[in-house]
Amino acid sequence: MANLPYKVIDEGIKLHILVSPKAQRDEVKGSEVVCDDRKGEIELLRVSVRAIADKGLANKAVLKVIAKWLNVPKSTVILLTGSKSRHKTVLIEGDGQNLMDEVNNLLSNL
């Protein structure tokens, strides 16, 4: 069984993301199970951004898309890992339980 695309922590939640740069629109497309050589099957939140993967433009766009999707301030969305990778981990600061409920609700409506 795959993990969820997030983990609730004391500071909020960590979202595990797979980014597609140079897309037609900025959007969260849903979740997807992928096979990772080190971790086995993992579930990632699929995010598309119009920005190119150059000079941090795609990273900034991902943070903006996530903030808008969850309706949280941009300042609460922080890139933790994956600055030069399509696989990223993002921290959303806040009440982890409320954020988890919101992610689940949004994913069920995609």
Image (cartoon, helix red, strand yellow):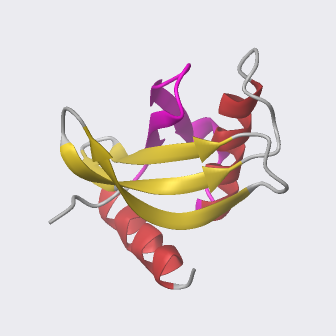
Q: Position of residue 59 (x, y in %)?
A: 66, 30
In this orientation, which residue lies closer to the viewer: 77 or 44?
44
Q: Position of residue 66 (x, y in %)?
A: 61, 52
Q: Nearer the viewer, residue 59 or 85?
A: 85
Residue located at (62% from left, 61% from top): 28
- Using the rendered view, name the quadrant where residue 60 is placed: top right
The residue under the point 81% across, 36% down is 51
* Residue depicted at 55% across the width and 40% down the height: 77
Q: Identify the residue at the far top of this view.
A: 55
Taking the magenta stretch, the answer to whether it contains residue 84 is yes
Residue stretch in magenta: 70-94
Whether residue 82 is in magenta: the answer is yes
Judge left or right: residue 6 versus residue 91.
Answer: left
Q: Is residue 50 left or right of residue 21?
A: right
- The percent coordinates of residue 49 (x first, y second) are 74, 46
Count of labels shown?
0
Q: Is residue 109 above or below residue 79?
A: below
Question: The C terminus lies in which quarter of the figure?
Answer: bottom right
Residue found farthest to the left = 1
* In the displayed structure image, the side of residue 10 where residue 110 appears, left or right: right
Q: Position of residue 78 (x, y in %)?
A: 52, 32
Name the foreground residue: 102 vs 18: 18
Q: Residue at x 22, y 58 (%)?
A: 3
- Residue 93 visible in the snapshot: no
